[in-house]
Image: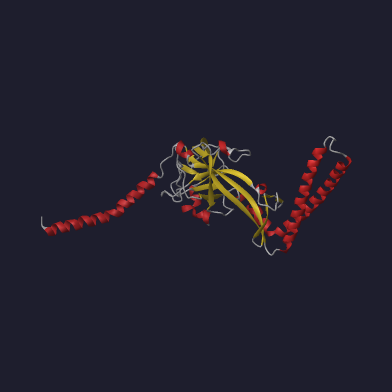
Amino acid sequence: MNPMKRLTDKKTIRKRILQSLPIVLAAIVVVIYGLSFLPRSAVRMERSVALVEGVTYYELRADGRPVAWFKRLGDSLTLDGLSLKADSSVMTRFYATGCWVDRYPFVPSCRGTLLVANGDSADAGRLSAAGGRLRTVLRREAVSLASAAERLGRVTEEIDYYMRVHNVNDDGFNVMAAYSEEVKAARLRADSLSAALARLGSAGRLDVVRRTKYAVLLGDTAGGVRRVECNVLTADGRKPFRLLQTADRRTPEGASSLYLHQWLTPSPAAGDSLVVASVPGCTLYGFNPAEARAAVFAGTARGAMRHDVPPLLAPDGSPVFTGDGRLAGFSLRGSIVKPSFFGFGFERLFK
């Protein structure tokens, strides 16, 4: 064959290959994208969820420095469980169903990322109201504590009188002695807190911050529970969902993360079959995390993107699938929040 013709043929082949590369790459992307829509089995649905443990408390700060802590902000803006120590007495522990998710619609991009319902969002309004009236709230709290200390002082006097006219051999003496110590300790706490709040009047800036720490609870090889600390990626307390990520940025072996497509997702109509994956009962008082197991539960769509699975079986944040295993969205107070709500790459949770 003519050497010049062979060279020309090679150039033509190379040109055709280069021209076809974009088409081949596009075809690969289409295939991968199509595969990401494949329905899930019940086992993979169960593996898409995990038990998340949260600990929350409030921090009172003066000029940016923490000075006191409390357990909850009451409806009337009371500082319930106020303490001068950040110990377990001011912390509330709760559990939620978390869902392993990929950050992007069809690229494996989980890296330990969890979507979880944001239980803090309901407190955002009270927290904002407390911030605007904090000095008034603290003055009222100081007065209440001073009154409590005075009342406890009178109780102490009555107990002391009882113990003066009785001796250790009398029935109930030991009970009253123990009660006396409790009352004195409570009075000391009330006095200390009242004085501390009174001193805050001279602070230039006062604010309250809600702190929430998360961990995902995973089974270990010994049949126990392993805690993996999580970082909060989207901390805005007003959004109904949050993104968490394991501290080591690893998705545990066996987990099955979900792609959250922005288009072509199903919209169940009234009467359509649904399946919810969750850690059932995790929001109930007295829930035992050691006995927690992920499971799936059948349900039916009610129309208007609502479902009939009770909260016990579908805690907020649980993924909701169609009867044939396609992701429809996430349960939130009986509604189904579609994946498009979060935006591409969960951008709407970051704003």
The residue closer to the viewer here, 16 or 144, is 144
In the drawing, does residue 28 fall left or right of residue 217?
Answer: left
How many numbered callouts? 0
The image shows residue 85 at horizontal and vertical percentages of 68, 52
Q: Residue furthest left?
A: 1
> Which residue is pictured at 65% across the width and 54% down the height?
59
The image shows residue 184 at horizontal and vertical percentages of 79, 47
- Residue 236 falls in which quadrant of the image? bottom right
The image shows residue 134 at horizontal and vertical percentages of 70, 58
Report the colour scheme.
secondary structure
The image shows residue 146 at horizontal and vertical percentages of 79, 53
- Residue 142 falls in which quadrant of the image? bottom right
The residue closer to the viewer here, 141 or 126, is 141
The residue closer to the viewer here, 162 or 339, is 162
The residue closer to the viewer here, 49 or 268, is 49
In the image, residue 33 sits, relative to residue 66, either above or below, namely above
Residue 330 in view, yes or no: no
Residue 11 in view, yes or no: yes
> Which residue is pictured at 58% across the width and 43% down the height?
95
In the image, residue 12 sits, relative to residue 93, either above or below, namely below
In the image, residue 192 sits, relative to residue 333, either above or below, namely below
In the drawing, does residue 158 fall left or right of residue 89?
Answer: right
In the drawing, does residue 310 fall left or right of residue 325?
Answer: right
Quarter of the picture containing the N terminus is: bottom left
